[in-house]
Amino acid sequence: MEFGNRRPTSDDAAFADVIVNGTTASFAKDVIEASRDALVLVDFWATWCGPCKQLSPILEKVVRSYGGRVRLVKIDVDANPAIAGQLRIQSMPTVYAFRDGRPLDGFMGAQPESVVREFVDRLVGEEVPGNIDDVLKSADELLEENDLQGAAEIYAAVLQEDRENAAALAGLAQCYIKSDDIERARQTIALVPPDKRKLAMVQSVQAQLDLAEKVAGLGSLGELEERIEFNPGDHQARFDLAIALAGAGRREDAMNHLLEIVRRDRTWNEDGARKQLLQFFEAWGAKEPLVSDGRRRLSSILFS
């Protein structure tokens, strides 16, 4: 399973405190004390070190994916020679892991993400922390940032502990949808227990999958647009175009075409345009700004 690797930005509030630039003076607070609450990785680096520049973004990505369970302290050895000397740092980059105030393990040199993640996994253990909501929130934020790999790994970790967690299943299914693996998305959402299938997050995924199925059976955008240009009253062509546009990510255009059908003929196809518009809103979710605007415009047409 391959996903995109875009990371949350460093000013993301959810990750503001997990990565800091440490100094000799702050080492006790940033590392020793902090390691009593979470696993702390200390990255000893230097500005002239090429491998350090390769390892740094990998460390940051891995640390962020743990939703606060792991922290990273970055120490420039040239600016902080005392602490580097005390720990006998001889090559860069060097990474030490601390827990409960003492070093556990470490490694030297630039390493691929898989090795770094395996290193951290082993030290953190496979247990999912008690506050599942916070963990899922961190995964949702990674998903919104399009870091599909990071989000999927957190959802999978939750599912290792709770195979029927609806939020994790819905999140993992959305990772598959965003990577265009519709079949695996269907398989994943099908694992949601029957009593949880009415949850909004599950319904949203199902609506996205239904939309993907409808898009697959339509003609090209150009053909549909030509039909409407030839006959603006061709509601079926406009309806199909709206679905195709939604599938192409052109949500506002899709919404406008369905609203136009409702404006022209509210009862067309047994209220089909309005029903499809509501399905769009369900698939897009409440965080999509177009949803509130679309609902307002739909109400204005229906009650005018």
Image (spheres, rainbow, N blue to C red):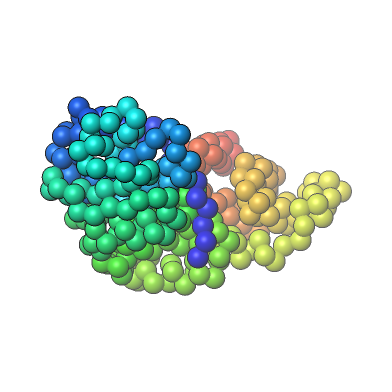
Name the residue rendered at 68%, 55% in the picture.
244
**Residue 82 placement, left or right of 159:** left
**Residue 174 placement, left or right of 128:** right
Q: Where does residue 147 sit, x and y in percent of width and height?
A: 47, 50
**Residue 34 placement, left or right of 260:** left
Q: Where does residue 144 sit, x and y in percent of width and height?
A: 46, 46
- Give the quadrant of residue 111: bottom left
Residue 303 visible, this orientation: no
277 relative to 181, above or below: above
Please tell me which residue lies in front, 69 or 207.
69
Q: Where does residue 106 sit, x and y in percent of width and height?
A: 28, 52
Please tell me which residue lies in front, 147 or 249.
147
34 relative to 240, above or below: above
Name the residue rendered at 26%, 66% in the picture.
161
- Counting the numbered discs, the total is 0
Q: Where does residue 289 sit, x and y in percent of width and height?
A: 50, 37
Q: Quadrant of the C terminus?
A: top right
191 relative to 124, above or below: below
Please tell me which residue lies in front, 107 or 168.
107
Name the residue rendered at 82%, 55% in the picture.
223
Please tell me which residue lies in front, 149 or 178.
149
**Residue 258 placement, left or right of 194:** right
Residue 52 visible, this orientation: yes
Name the residue rendered at 80%, 46% in the picture.
232
